[in-house]
Image: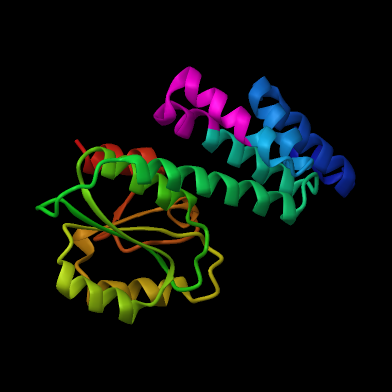
Amino acid sequence: MKPSEIAKLSLEELDQQVLNHANKNITSPIELAIEAIHEFDEWKLLKIINDQIALNGFDKVLFEFIIQLLERIGILWQASAITPANEHFASNLIRQKIISVIDQLEPVVVKENKCLLFLPEGEIHELDLLMTHYMLKKRGFHCLYLGSTVTLVDLVDLAKDYDPTYYISNTTNNIGVNVSDYLVQLKRHIPSKKTHLTGALVRDTNFEIDPSFNTYSSTKELIDSIAK
């Protein structure tokens, strides 16, 4: 649409246009999953995910189904077609599923490929980081997963003993702290050349990140770079 046409739309009409655009490439299983999320139907949503895993394997489901589903949820949330409660319900169920699959992987002996995975203080969106954890552990990397809202002090203290080969984090641009200041402090305390960042903030062209950090536009790109 032309900008002049968009400017004439009401908020309701704008939401509908967003939904119309989003609906063009939606597969049936994703639509069924959205229905289950709207209904807070845990068993229905799990069955859809498990059926997809049985058909395609977990790796393919992770990148071709779950990521698309999360993107779809994000669009619906922006268009006021889904509630925060629906989003939390779906995210937590998917989080539990990924953790259960990680737990089924064989333990990895600590060796040279050591990954310290963390989210900055105030950052709670950990699904991408969990996906990274799964993919790296499956490829034989030793992963120390710290999860969400890790203080810089705790990160530095732990890193002294663990001595990671890779520091891996995922960052959005809405974490309740000054991200620019945080990244400056991060560079002062850990080697930026060992630090690998992805997430919405990295993709934000209006935000500049020190080029000494390794940055990736997606989780898959990060995995492909580290686990060559």
Quarter of the figure that contains the N terminus:
top right
Which image quarter: residue 88?
A: bottom right
Looking at the rendering, the stretch of residues picked out in magenta corresponds to: 46-65
Q: Is residue 174 magenta?
A: no
Q: Is residue 199 above or below residue 208?
A: above
7 or 145: which is nearer to us?
145
Q: Is residue 12 above or below residue 115?
A: above
213 or 148: which is nearer to us?
148
- The x and y percentages for residue 138 are 27, 38
- The x and y percentages for residue 196 are 29, 55
User: What residue occupies the far top of the structure in this picture?
Assistant: 55
Q: Is residue 48 above or below residue 7?
A: above
User: What residue occupies the far left of the structure in this picture?
Assistant: 112
- The x and y percentages for residue 96 are 51, 48
Q: How many marks?
A: 0
User: What residue occupies the far bottom of the structure in this picture?
Assistant: 153
Position of 80 compared to 60: left or right? Answer: right
Q: Give me the residue at 49% from left, 26% from top.
A: 53
78 or 144: which is nearer to us?
144
Q: Is residue 49 magenta?
A: yes
Position of 136 compared to 8: left or right? Answer: left
Quarter of the figure that contains the C terminus:
top left
Q: Give me the residue at 32% from left, 44% from top.
A: 222
Which image quarter: residue 102?
A: top left
Q: Quick check: can you spot residue 188?
A: no
Q: Give me the residue at 82% from left, 46% from top.
A: 7
Position of 143 compared to 74: left or right? Answer: left
143 or 75: which is nearer to us?
143
- Figure coloring: rainbow
